[in-house]
């Protein structure tokens, strides 16, 4: 895998030639490596580090304060707080069961908070008490808009890089039902992780269109190397918080919806959260706590998750069911608990 870092600055601001060049490198990176790391994705200075600081503030609340924003598990878009072990990412991938006798034992050692569009009345957000964490709701709503703006710019770039007419993907995204998440991985003993039933996050593909992922400096995010390994035994490569001395602001991943829209041309990014690279040879001790943030750009609720006609050929027929993006979310989320 090459360094796979793309400077996105020229896409929103450059000439047509610059924009085309960024768009093509982005799509080639997604096709060949399954993800890309972006510098200058378009966030205001310090926004991503401030977002991670807000995550620290939220997860430092008492359990009872966090539970005031509890997100009831169910077949619907995820909202609110989920305690450690509640979401079972392992269940999204049948290969994760290999060598284990029950799904119930495969757990993710992480807690999380999810919010959907600020104005969503059908699946409203749930919030902690303002008195417990003043300004949390206001700041999250503003971050949601910030992440959505950048994600939609990236959709324009992907559209261009794929040679699609303008709006071909955008029309299925807007108004988006994106979800902004914060993750906290508590400190966990290496002995617990070595048993193989509990992971920080089990291998999975996110279900939205694209994911923008930000992480603190602990490390541990790993992405399957396309072309290496097999579905039963993927070959994971660490995606360090900073690459080649360059400040990488965001990791861009392909979700299951975009994989479907492109009929598999852009493969869904298989990823997991494992030990930070320097701890791999260690047997004893604790893996330090870690924080990350993700924006899952999700399609308009009524958009289809079927491939665009441009990607359907006799060699590459459609292999997935057609349904609305909302139905797809419900089916996938239902499997997670
Ligand atoms: O924490 C990370 O780096 C990845 C989190 C993740 O995969 C997710 O929230 O879907
Ligand atoms: Fe993920």
Image: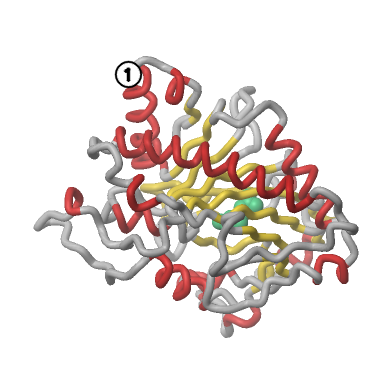
Task: Work out whether residue 179 can be spotted.
Answer: yes
Image quarter in which the N terminus is found: top left
User: Number of numbered discs present?
Assistant: 1
Q: Nearer the viewer, residue 21 or 67?
A: 67
Position of 6 with respect to 69 (left or right) is: left
List x then y, in percent, for residue 294: 60, 50
| Image quadrant where residue 31 sits | top left
Q: Residue at image x 86%, y 54%? A: 133
Confirm if mark 1 falls within 8 A of ligand 2. Answer: no
Considering depth in this image, is 164 or 221 the residue closer to the camera?
A: 164
Helix, strand or loop under label 1: helix
Is residue 278 shown to the viewer in this render?
Answer: no
Is 309 situated left or right of 23 in this image? left
Left or right relative to 204: residue 132: right
The residue sitting at 90% across, 58% down in the picture is 131
- Percent position (x, y) of residue 197? 66, 72
Q: How is the image coloured?
A: secondary structure
Q: Is residue 78 left or right of residue 163?
A: right
Q: Please state the horizontal and vertical placement of residue 243, each as a whole percent of the image.
A: 60, 30
Relative to 102, say whether 145 is above or below. above
Q: Quadrant of the C terminus?
A: bottom right
Residue positioned 56% across, 26% down in the render? 40
Residue 50 in picture, x, y percent from top left: 76, 38
Residue that sits furthest to the left in the current view: 314
Figure quarter occupied by ligand 1: bottom right
Residue receiving disc 1:
16
């Amino acid at each position: 895998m090459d360094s796979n870092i793309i400077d996105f600055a020229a896409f929103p601001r450059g000439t047509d030639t610059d924009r085309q060049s960024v768009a093509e490198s982005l799509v080639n990176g997604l096709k060949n490596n399954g993800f890309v790391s972006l510098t200058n994705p378009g966030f205001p200075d310090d926004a991503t580090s401030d977002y991670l600081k807000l995550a620290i503030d939220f997860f430092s609340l008492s359990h009872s304060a966090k539970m005031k924003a509890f997100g009831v598990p169910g077949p619907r878009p995820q909202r609110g707080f989920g305690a450690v072990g509640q979401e079972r990412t392992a269940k999204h991938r049948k290969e994760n069961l290999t060598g284990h006798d029950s799904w119930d034992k495969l757990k993710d050692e992480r807690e999380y908070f999810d919010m959907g569009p600020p104005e969503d009345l059908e699946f409203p957000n749930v919030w902690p008490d303002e008195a417990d964490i003043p300004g949390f709701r206001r700041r999250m709503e503003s971050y949601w808009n910030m992440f959505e703006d950048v994600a939609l710019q990236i959709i324009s770039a992907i559209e261009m890089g794929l040679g699609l007419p303008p709006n071909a993907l955008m029309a299925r995204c807007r108004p988006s039902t994106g979800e902004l998440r914060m993750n906290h991985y508590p400190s966990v003993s290496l002995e617990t992780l070595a048993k193989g039933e509990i992971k920080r996050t089990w291998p999975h593909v996110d279900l939205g269109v694209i994911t923008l992922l930000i992480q603190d400096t602990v490390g541990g995010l790993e992405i399957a190397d396309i072309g290496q390994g097999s579905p039963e035994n993927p070959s994971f490569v660490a995606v360090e918080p900073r690459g080649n001395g360059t400040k990488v602001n965001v990791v861009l991943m392909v979700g299951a919806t975009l994989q479907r829209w492109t009929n598999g041309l852009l493969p869904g990014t298989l990823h997991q959260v494992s030990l930070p690279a320097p701890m791999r040879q260690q047997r004893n001790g604790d893996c330090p706590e870690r924080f990350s943030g993700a924006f899952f750009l999700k399609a308009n609720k009524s958009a289809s998750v079927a491939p665009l006609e441009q990607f359907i050929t006799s060699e590459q027929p459609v292999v997935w069911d057609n349904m609305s993006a909302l139905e797809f979310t419900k089916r996938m989320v239902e499997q997670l608990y």
